[in-house]
Amino acid sequence: MSRLLTVDKLSSGYGLTPVLRSVSLHVDTGEVVAVVGANGVGKSTLLRTITGLLHPTHGDIQFDGMPIAGMPAHAIVGHGLAMVPEGGRLFMFMTVLENLELGAFGPTAREDVRRSLDEVMELFPILRQRRTQLAGSLSGGERQMCAIARALMSRPRMLMLDEPSLGLSPVMLEKVFDLIRSVAASRDLTVLLIEQNVADALDMANRAYVIEGGKIAKTGPGAELLHDPDIQRAYLGL
Ligand SMILES: Nc1ncnc2c1ncn2[C@@H]1O[C@H](COP(=O)(O)OP(=O)(O)O)[C@@H](O)[C@H]1O
Ligand SMILES: [Mg+2]
């Protein structure tokens, strides 16, 4: 396995307010890695910094051996790193198809629009059925699928998802997580999953990092962390 994403001693925040304090983590090609933690610990800030929406105050980020810290967000997507933001952020007054087409970002993705559309609609058949509907008329689970499909339209090598379980029923959550896992396996896609839903995220991830107060508090295989007494006490209500 080769190293795809390396985050090294990253610090980041808003104005004079530091949020992340010397965060280091890595993701290898083909892995599904979770970053879990309570509300407000800096999970979204981490994703925003990796994707170039926020500039770090310290530290390095490498994607596929290339330094990307401080690079503009559109250039980072162009290098194969796509994000599904919290809540999906679809364009509610555009159709499913229009939302998907907007995801075909970058020159190679644009050439492949038709092929990518076929592929994502095969992965998410419900989106083919709903393709002419406005995104605002979709259910929560369908919106999340549409947001994931839109990110896949850029033909990324790595997909980062910010709280995809948010607002989903347990049944929908299981469906969306199963889809993420099968997309990762079938498409040779590397996944970084950010979640407040610690139990389900640890269950689905190969490896995970637990973030507390802007720092990595613990790391290990998902299954191992699920059985860690500290984690069980703090996050799993056991
Ligand atoms: N745009 C912002 N401006 C100032 N502070 C922010 C902003 N976004 C988030 N924060 C603060 O940064 C901290 C981490 O937020 P966030 O990364 O969104 O946490 P999480 O995603 O883990 O819930 C919180 O204290 C939050 O209030
Ligand atoms: Mg968040």
Image (cartoon, rainbow, N blue to C red):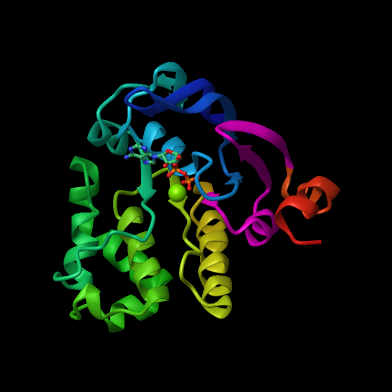
Residue at the spot 58% in from the left edge and 72% down from the top edge: 174
| Residue at the limit of the structure toward the front, as seen here | 16
Residue 167: horizontal and vertical position, in percent? 46, 70
Number of marks: 0
Residue at the spot 53% in from the left edge and 50% down from the top edge: 39
Q: Is residue 46 left or right of residue 77?
A: right
Asked if one can make out residue 12 in the rendered structure from this viewpoint, the answer is yes
Asked whether residue 191 is drawn in magenta, I would say no
Residue 72: horizontal and vertical position, in percent? 25, 28
The image quadrant of residue 87 is bottom left
Residue 65: horizontal and vertical position, in percent? 46, 21
On screen, residue 157 above or below 57: below
On screen, residue 133 above or below 74: below
The image quadrant of residue 145 is bottom left
Asked whether residue 197 is drawn in magenta, I would say yes
Q: Nearer the viewer, residue 157 or 146?
A: 146
The C terminus - image quarter: bottom right
Q: Nearer the viewer, residue 37 or 161?
A: 37
Residue at the spot 49% in from the left edge and 22% down from the top edge: 10
Q: Is residue 232 left or right of residue 199?
A: right
| Residue at the limit of the structure toward the bottom, as seen here | 129
Asked if one can make out residue 65 in the rendered structure from this viewpoint, the answer is no
Q: Which residues are magenta?
A: 194-220
On screen, residue 30 above or below 176: above
The image quadrant of residue 17 is top left
Residue 147: horizontal and vertical position, in percent? 34, 62
The N terminus - image quarter: top right
Residue at the spot 18% in from the left edge and 80% down from the top edge: 132
On screen, residue 190 above or below 226: above
Q: Nearer the viewer, residue 142 or 41?
A: 41
Q: Is residue 31 left or right of residue 75?
A: right
